[in-house]
Image (cartoon, grey):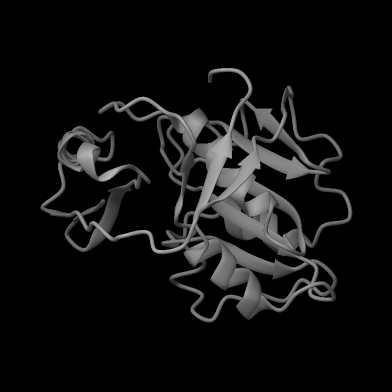
Amino acid sequence: MRASRGGTHVSGAERITKQVYIPTITSALTSRALNHSFGVPDEIHITVDQVRTTPLIVDQLPVKNMSEVGDLLDGLPEIGYHIAASEIRMRGATLIDVHTGARLEPDPERGVRVSMMDWEFTPITEEEDHFRESVALATKVHHCPGMVAELAISNDPGFTSGYVVRNGVFHRIPKMKELGQHGGGRAFYLDTTVTTPQEAIAFLEHRPVLVRSETPM
């Protein structure tokens, strides 16, 4: 589901599910788009695609609550933070060469759109759950070959939270910007000696992944 108003992105979401649940989930995603904190959209597009590749099943990242970023970004190119914290609305994430700081995404305005992921078992709901969705997305990103770290700051002015994934841990941070601030985005840090940007983008955008959790979230 993609919703926009005046050509500006308002909300988006996706699910991987069985055919029998498609009508229910379609209704839930439509309701979610109409009740987003960014306002009522003037366009809602819902697309249903058959998943033709058996999803990769991976274990959820462990979660650690942190009071601040601390040294989690040490050694990472600073450009990633500057882009993620800016008020420039990218449609996806920026992909950064962890060695040089160079941007690797083909289209800097579009960025890299992580897609084709969901929880292995998850309830059908109309409500948006930022935390659950962030953990699922971050878990898929972490399993991309060559991925070193991820930084994310909520772009919703009603949320100040964000997270950093480093060394296989999802570090949840309650305040990474001021309340009411519109800035926010994602930065992925890739080791280009392990994989190419093209291979990483193909995994992030097209490889189906289901996230397994030992305990309900």
Front residue of this view, candidates 120 and 98 = 120
Q: Is residue 188 left or right of residue 159?
A: right
Residue extending farthest top: 216
Count the labels in the image. Answer: 0
Front residue of this view, candidates 15 and 171 = 15
Residue 111 image offset from top left, x and y in percent: 50, 68
Residue extending farthest left: 42
Q: Residue at the spot x=70%, y=63% of the render?
A: 79
In this picture, is 135 found above or below 45?
above
Residue 31 image offset from top left, x and y in percent: 16, 34
Front residue of this view, candidates 209 and 173 = 209
Residue 148 image offset from top left, x and y in percent: 79, 56
Residue 188 image offset from top left, x and y in percent: 66, 59
Front residue of this view, candidates 163 and 156 = 163
Q: Quadrant of residue 195?
A: bottom right
Q: Quadrant of residue 49?
A: bottom left
Q: Residue at the spot x=58%, y=66% of the render?
A: 203
Q: Residue at the spot x=83%, y=34% of the render?
A: 70
Q: Residue at the spot x=19%, y=54% of the render?
A: 46
